[in-house]
């Protein structure tokens, strides 16, 4: 599905040459939110088992996830 994705960047001066895109999900693709959720779901578990939490008073925080434009 995403095996040979090519992208270009639109700038003021014009459009860049196309380049291979090996990571990420495509903007505007209906499947992108689902793929993002599948992969992001494992990150808190990884942080909780491998990182020391930061303390804020009585609260411990080991991973803070934030997504924009949902």
Image (spheres, rainbow, N blue to C red):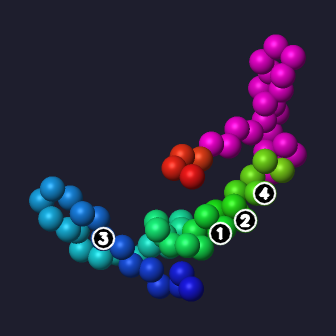
Mark 2 lies on a secondary structure that is helix
Residue 23 appears anywhere in the view:
no
Which of marks 4 and 1 precedes in the sequence?
Answer: 1
Circle 2 residue:
38
Q: Tell me where residue 51 appears, x and y as whole percent.
A: 80, 39
Image quarter for residue 59? top right
Judged left or right of residue 59, residue 34 is left
Helix, strand or loop at label 3? It is loop
Q: Earlier in the sequence, mark 1 or mark 3?
A: 3
Q: Secondary structure at mark 4?
A: loop
Identify which residue is drawn at 24% across, 63% down: 10
Q: Which residues are magenta?
A: 46-66
- What is the spatial separation of the Cα atoms under label 3 and label 2, in whole angstroms? 26 Å
Q: Residue furthest left?
A: 13
Give the crowd class for mark 2: few <14, some 14-19, many >=20 residues within 10 Å: few
Name the quadrant containing residue 2.
bottom right
Nearer the camera: disc 2 or disc 4 = 2
Q: Residue at x 78, y 35 (%)?
A: 62
CA gap, disc 1 and disc 3: 22 Å
CA–CA distance between discs 1 and 2?
Answer: 5 Å
- The residue where tag 3 is placed is 8
Question: Considering only order in the chain, which callout, 4 or 3, is on the residue closer to the N terminus?
Answer: 3
Determine whether 22 is above or below 47 in the image: below
The nearer-to-camera label among 3 and 2 is 2
Q: Residue at x 80, y 21 (%)?
A: 55
Mark 2–mark 4 Cα distance, whole angstroms, equals 8 Å
Q: Is residue 35 above or below residue 69?
A: below
Residue 35 tag number: 1
Q: From the viewer's perspective, is 24 left or right of 7? A: right
- Identified at 24% across, 74% down, the residue is 17
The residue indicated by pointer 4 is 42
């Amino acid at each position: 599905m995403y095996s040979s994705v090519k992208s270009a960047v639109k700038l003021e001066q014009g459009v860049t040459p196309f380049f291979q895109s090996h990571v990420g999900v495509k903007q505007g693709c209906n499947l992108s939110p689902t793929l993002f959720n599948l992969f992001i779901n494992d990150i808190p578990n990884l942080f909780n088992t491998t990182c020391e939490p930061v303390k804020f008073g009585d609260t411990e925080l080991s991973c803070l996830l934030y997504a924009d434009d949902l």
